[in-house]
Amino acid sequence: MEVMQQNLFYDRFDAIILEPKHFVLACHVNPDGDAIGSVLAMSEFLRAKGHEVKMVVANDFPGFLHWMPGAEDFLVFEQDAEGTKDAIAAADCIMMLDFNNLSRGGILHNEIGKTRCPRILVDHHRDPELDQFYCAYSETCVSSASEIVAEIILHYGMEYLTESIATNLLVGIMTDTGSFSHSIYHPRTMELCSILVGKSMPYTMIHQLVYDTMSENRLRLLGFSIDHRMEVLDAYSTAIIALSKSDLDKFNYQAGDTEGVVNYPLSMQKIKMSVLITERQDQIRFSFRSKGSFSVHELANKHFKGGGHNNAAGGTLTCSFEEAVEKLKSVLPEYQKMLNEAE
Ligand SMILES: [Mn+2]
């Protein structure tokens, strides 16, 4: 089944890239390393194939990704709404990477929704709306969208794998697997990485550029989150970290500063699920992580208007900060047995 789908993908993708086109590549709102890395790598590949490519995002990405090769070329809707709208309206083909649901495009949603050109999906999230796409490479048992992009580029030949493509794809795989600590389902991920590392910037430099760039405020926010804002609910093998707007203000919060905070509680042996709740401008954001068989996708999808992967998902609610924390606690009994028995 999988192989058939991929053959169909290449049949259609081959046809699409045969003639020069104006591509627009988009990823999800609050873009992460995988979103940015997969878009940058695919853009460079399509340019090498003779296409015009514009890369669009709803909002800016964290500073620790700004160094990525080509990152300065992104059109950011929040900073240049007209330029971004014009680029989308002029597209012959729109590619969505690292998201499969137009609502995850944030404010780009409406603009992409207005277009009539073919759409291509390259993604690893669950429950894609496949009927919206002319062709789709949608695979959930891979580490990242960047891993799929690596497969696609290698399908066309090693000669397309430049240093910048390899570097961008490694950032995507490295960040979506928490530095190769989860979401690795098959040896192919490591095989691809070994090919990428052979072409990329030195791997240790990539790792440092992404992970060793904290401001003092960000590291102190992490310490504060764990020491003062983490609640451990032993009955549910769950830990919750809830950060209010005033908590974030106290540490002069910058985009990306809470990145990774949600992972720390999982390093306790007894914890199966970790939830980070943050109060944003007009909504409450939830970030879910789990270990092993407990799927946070279902929980996020059913109760928090979100979803994602089995072990990592997100969601949002429009309510007060206090209500959000109560809402989470109120759904835990439904999952108590599954959480405590998860392996
Ligand atoms: Mn991803």
Image (tube, rainbow, N blue to C red):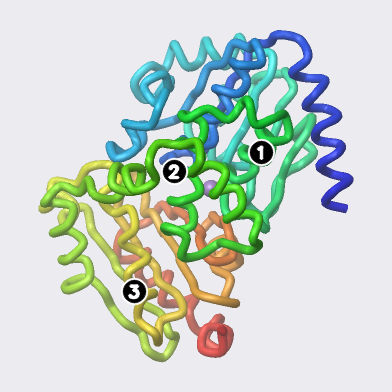
Inspect this view and state whether residue 327 appears. Answer: yes
The residue singled out by tag 2 in the image is: 171
The spot of residue 127 in percent (x, y) is 69, 53
Spatial CA distance of label 1 from label 2 is 17 Å
The residue singled out by tag 1 in the image is: 122
Question: Which of pointers 3 and 2 lies earlier in the amino acid sequence?
Answer: 2
Tell me the element at label 3: helix
Q: Is mark 3 within 8 Å of ligand 1?
A: no
The front one of 167 and 132 is: 167
Spatial CA distance of label 3 from label 2 is 24 Å
Inspect this view and state whether residue 40 appears. Answer: no
The front one of 82 and 270 is: 270
Residue kind at label 1, given as amino acid type: Val
Closer mark to the observer between disc 3 and disc 2: 2
Q: What residue is at 54 percent from the left and 30 percent from the top?
A: 41
Q: Is residue 243 above or below residue 39?
A: below
Spatial CA distance of label 3 from label 1 is 31 Å
User: Which disc, if any, is residue 6?
Assistant: none
Classify 10 Å Cα crowding around label 1: few (below 14), some (14-19), many (20 and above). many
Classify 10 Å Cα crowding around label 3: few (below 14), some (14-19), many (20 and above). many
Residue extending furthest toward the front? 198
The spot of residue 255 in percent (x, y) is 28, 42
Instruction: Say if mark 3 contacts mark 2, CB within 8 Å.
Output: no
The spot of residue 277 in percent (x, y) is 34, 61
Q: Is residue 231 above or below residue 172?
A: below
Classify 10 Å Cα crowding around label 2: few (below 14), some (14-19), many (20 and above). many
Tell me the element at label 2: helix
The residue singled out by tag 3 in the image is: 265
